Amino acid sequence: SKASNGSSIQKVMSHKERAVKCCHPLVRSLYSIMNDKETNLCMSVDFTSSEDLLQLVDKVGPHVCLVKTHIDMLEDFTTDVTQQLQRLAHKHNFLIFEDRKFGDIGKTVHTQYQGGMYKISSWAHITNAHPVPGPGIVSALAEVGKPLGRGCLMVAEMSSSGNLATGEYTKAAVKMAETNKDFVIGFISQSRLSADPDLVHMTPGIKIQMGGDSLGQQYVTPKMAITERGADVIIVGRGITGVSDPVGAAKEYKQAGYSAYLNTLNH
Amino acid sequence: SKASNGSSIQKVMSHKERAVKCCHPLVRSLYSIMNDKETNLCMSVDFTSSEDLLQLVDKVGPHVCLVKTHIDMLEDFTTDVTQQLQRLAHKHNFLIFEDRKFGDIGKTVHTQYQGGMYKISSWAHITNAHPVPGPGIVSALAEVGKPLGRGCLMVAEMSSSGNLATGEYTKAAVKMAETNKDFVIGFISQSRLSADPDLVHMTPGIKIQMGGDSLGQQYVTPKMAITERGADVIIVGRGITGVSDPVGAAKEYKQAGYSAYLNTLNH
């Protein structure tokens, strides 16, 4: 890392360096995994069957740093699923990210994060929150997650067409992150929002083939996300889960994402 | 209704008139209940035990037009709970509103609304959504909910301190509602946002004693919400569920809310 201004340092700081230098232990773990497994790929597993989910995670686990769930999509959820998921996370050395997109007042999200059927805070290393309710959402989630060493991403930008996470809204999300780094570990974003290397940028809506779906999703390629938009982690869902050879696809995304990352180190 | 401009018509149009004139059958049902039971009170039941929830709903049901749930707070959820809730809705003539605050891209919320353990669309007459993902969230939820006669509220404003649902964000939410009236039936708001009498304004964060909590919630009184802020329905949670005599409190809120409503008719 030769540059002296924040923005350039952050661009060229390697996974290996961030695995040592980042403040939050969870962020160091994540970068350590990324460095060891040579992957910046997060797989999004939007399944309705627990067996389908666990089987795919077991196969693709070796190629990802993070597995992203929507636990409330499972038709047959039991606590056994999250136990199995934790076992697979240990076996394949990845972290678990429940994409809950909390969006309520503090008192409510506190219970939703800790309690209910899902007890998200007990098994998900990472979750995320919309900034729209204001800073109370972060303090409430932190009350639950901080003692457990959990981390939260702010949904600062979205990939869907016509979304409202722009301008002052995004700036407010960045501020909530930068002022709560003991619990907020980064962003769901479509561009580099903070020069602070402690904050991880994760970008969803990634596909090797660009395009969209019929419900407003808009895709970008792994290379675009990492090289042009400054993503640290690329989140791929249907590009892996929706094809006939998910393991092959995962390897392809891993390769595309990692070589784009290596490329940023040389600039 | 004597006034000739939209804003005044909407202010003075009675529940009885709206029960006949509103476009959406669900809105007509809601106003018909409000007129018959002389209540504009929605009770928010944030319980972790199904038995506690059902017992209170059975007691307070006669005094409310709407029961608002956070179904994912229940530690012991089974499909029997939502069946019992529907039975109570029929017994006491109220509607059910699952306060899910959907906030994801279209494809995701489609599954979250229809599927998973909760099958929200199968039992909740009303749900709500953040506008932040853009119009795709409405089209996706509508694909599920419209054929079932369900309705959705846009979270256009929030009650929590420092929230970002203001200005252009709120305007975009209003536009999403006004252009999707076959499924969007109104707003979660803190003020009157649309002159269209088809759109119901529901205001949370209501307490007879003003103040706040330690996690950013800010309360207003029933009278303020209805008279000054143009709420059609007041949403009361801890003001009823957090006191020693919830039925007595519900009657008090019903009375305060309804007399404030009657007062608006005389202006």
Image (spheres, coloured by chain):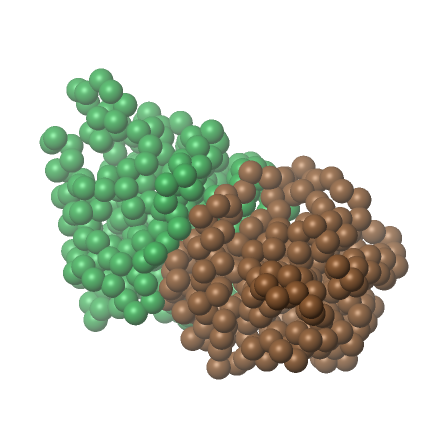
Chain colours: A green, B brown
Front residue (pair B83, A25): B83
Name the residue located 56 percent from the left edge and 77 percent from the top edge: B23
* Residue A199 x %, y %: 36, 34
- Res B236 visible: yes
Seen at 38% across and 64% down, the residue is B136
Q: Tell me residue B116's x, y (percent).
A: 49, 69
Q: Nearer the viewer, residue B183 or A81?
A: B183
Answer left or right for A212 relative to A66.
left
Seen in the picture, residue B108 relative to A16 is either above or below; the reply is: below
Whether residue A119 is visible: no
Task: Tell me the residue at 32%/58% (across/down).
Answer: A161
Quadrant assignment for the N terminus of chain B = bottom right
- For the image shown, how many numbered marks are present on the structure? 0
- Is B126 above or below relative to B203? below
Q: Is residue B260 left or right of residue A232?
A: right
Q: Which residue is at 52% across, 60% downward?
A: B154
Quadrant position of the C terminus of chain B in the picture: bottom right
Q: Position of residue A167 (x, y in %)?
A: 37, 41
Q: Is residue B5 left or right of residue A149?
A: right
